[in-house]
Image (tube, coloured by chain):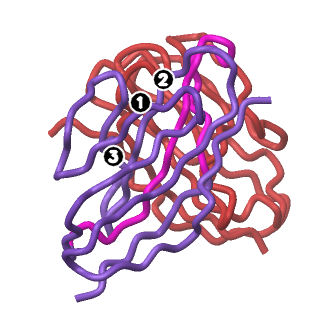
Chain colours: A red, B purple
Amino acid sequence: EAQVTQNPRYLITVTGKKLTVTCSQNMNHEYMSWYRQDPGLGLRQIYYSMNVEVTDKGDVPEGYKVSRKEKRNFPLILESPSPNQTSLYFCASSPRAGGLYEQYFGPGTRLTVT
Amino acid sequence: AQRVTQPEKLLSVFKGAPVELKCNYSYSGSPELFWYVQYSRQRLQLLLRHISRESIKGFTADLNKGETSFHLKKPFAQEEDSAMYYCALSHTDSNYQLIWGAGTKLIIKP
């Protein structure tokens, strides 16, 4: 089944403890993106990747890192999580660059930082 | 700066009534506009895009450049339309990244 997977789906952690949220797609998509969703704010883009080894900052990149070493994977890294990073995170992919194509979303990762 | 505004956080209508979810944008050029939907316990997914000029699940949306709007409409709401709806904009100035509205929760009452 063609899809975007994220792991873990739920995570509760403490301030400062490094964590990684994985994202993988099996559709051979070039483009991948990370969003966070907060009440009343909609989706805000954290980072995106137009292709392997190419990543760019979105609107809210502070406190996050990403890498795109292979086409299918786009992990989101929080080196030192803080409570303001408590949010619902979505990974998405599309065949080519961004909004021109339909974006396929993962199921979301609910992160709580205490 | 480019922005997408969905003025209603919550919209509640009765089954069979018409539905209009509002979306306004600020961008002076020619944008690409989309409606995405998230049903309960499902993933966010594309509903329709203005360039396709199609009707999906009875929903239509017309790009009005004069009013910079892209309202989503359905003449007769169904209970299964209850969901979270997001309007999004893409354009060359943003390197085609999507700019999202805050979303409108649509509740269809029986």
Kind of element beneath mark 3: strand
Q: Which residue is mark 1?
A: A93
State which chain disc 3 sits on: B
Q: Residues within 10 Å of mark 2 (few under 14, many from 20)?
A: some
Kind of element beneath mark 2: strand
Q: Report the span colored magenta.
A: B80-101
Where residue B97 sits: x, y (%)?
59, 24
| Kind of residue indicated by mark 2 | Glu
B47 lies left or right of A74: left
Quadrant of the image for the N terminus of chain B? top right
Q: Residue furthest bottom?
A: B110
| Kind of residue indicated by mark 3 | Gln
Image: A12 above or below B22: below
Q: Is residue B86 magenta?
A: yes
Q: Which residue: 47% across, 69% down?
A: B105
Q: Which residue is mark 3?
A: B45
State which chain disc 2 sits on: B
Q: Find the distance from the CA under tag 3 to the CA under tag 1.
A: 12 Å
Quadrant of the image for the C terminus of chain B? bottom left
Q: Between residue B11 and residue A52, name the one nearer to us.
A: B11
**Lower position in the chain sequence, tag 3 or tag 2:** 2
Q: Between residue B82 and residue A88, name the one nearer to us.
A: B82
Kind of element beneath mark 1: strand
Q: Which residue: 70% across, 68% down?
A: A13
A25 lies left or right of B92: left
Q: Which mark is residue B32?
A: 2
